[in-house]
Amino acid sequence: MHLASGVDPQLADLSNKLIYSAMAVYTIAMFAHMFEWTFGSKGAVAVRSKEQSGTLAETVAAAGNKAAKKVTVTVAGAGGGTTTLTRTALAGAGATVVTSGRGEDEVDGPGAAGSSEKADLAGRIAVSLTVLATLLHAGGVVTRGLSVSRWPWGNMYEFSCAFALSMTGAYLVLLAARKNVRWLGLPVVVAVLLTLGIATQVLYTDSEQLVPALHSYWLAIHVSTAIFCGGAFYAAFIATLLYLGKDAFDRRMAAGLAKGPLGTSASIWQRLPAASTLDKLSYRINALVFPLWTFTIIAGAIWAEAAWGKYWEWDPKETWSFITWVAYACYLHARATAGWKGRKAAYLALAAFACWLFNYYGVNIFVTGKHSYAGI
């Protein structure tokens, strides 16, 4: 231990090696998840999806051959912020109705592996690798803190490492609780790799002691809750994106199209949870974490008064934290208001997450303020 600087260089170096080792294992886990999705597309669910798509297209085409006069799409609201689409082809003697099977008939997909044993094996290997990477990752975060004898989230690099760890930790906890969320594995691992990549290449700061303003027990309270909120907001963001994609896929199926959005395979969307499930998941996560984000802001204000003498000075980080709070408050209010469920509310959720993302990266990197202590 170098007493002058209060930094143990050996532990700091070990932390860096563990983080890079975790990134290597996460990368292998990412490829394993990709194999899971690829092999899964050849399972029974993919064959069934292809058959259903073909049957739907044939039905609509047959209706068109019977001198169909017009085609209408009827959209009716359903519970949980979803819609039910019905395609009606009017022919001379009557109408052929093709329903997307949504609303009460919605069922969750079987997951990334489908019914393929090979894909299931790839998925299990991916989860095992993710567990190993998370252990290495946790070791990197812990040794970083031990190298300076403090909580390991005193700058943007450390915060990013802890934030990425919270993502995989939450994912593995859900798996341990036997929740059917293995489909989240690929986006979680990709996000972790991107976060750690930015942390190590852009945000990296040598292990060092904190500036005087950060020597407080509020570091453990305020920053740890911010890390947890970030992980939860990201999970809700992924659920929202997938909801919009699954909803678009269902609309395309109802219109007789065999492909998913952007030309993606139909089997990918068939294996995901139902649109209503994804919509509810996103809403519940955001609703659950919103009070904690409120507490994070309040705790920050209390800490600011202790460190700088004022509760609120409209520092850029304070301002964008408040903007993020307002954005999520608008989303939750809209989600509970008739006529703003489904896609409209989902767009608000994406805008709110964009505010959080700018508050996370943009403010610290591009804006100078009292939170600019990361050495970037």
Image: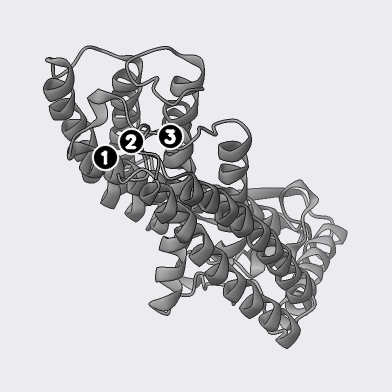
Q: Where is residue 31 in the image (x, y as percent from the top left)?
A: 73, 64
- Is 214 on the left-hand or right-hand side of 5? left
What SS does tag 2 mark? Answer: helix
Is 354 in front, or is 80? 354
Q: Which numbered tag is attached to residue 328?
A: 2
State which tag comes first along the sequence, 1 or 2: 1
Q: Mark 1 points at which residue?
A: 293
Q: Disc 3 or 2, which lies upstream in sequence?
A: 2
Q: Observer-nearest residue: 373 or 5?
A: 5
Q: Disc 1 versus disc 2: distance between alpha carbons?
A: 10 Å
Q: Sort mark 3 into few (<14), some (14-19) or many (20+) by Cα contacts within 10 Å.
A: many
Residue depth check, mark 1 versus mark 3: number of the one nearer the observer: 1
Between tags 3 and 2, which lies in front? 2
Asked whether residue 182 appears in the rendered view, the answer is no
Look at label 2 and name its amino acid.
Tyr
Other residues around mark 1 within 10 Å, as few (<14) / some (14–19) / many (≥20): many
Decide if residue 268 is on the left or right side of residue 59. Answer: left
From the viewer's perspective, is 317 left or right of 347?
Answer: left
Classify residue 55 by image quadrant: bottom right
Where does the N terminus fall, quadrant-wise? Answer: top left
Q: Which mark is residue 348?
A: 3
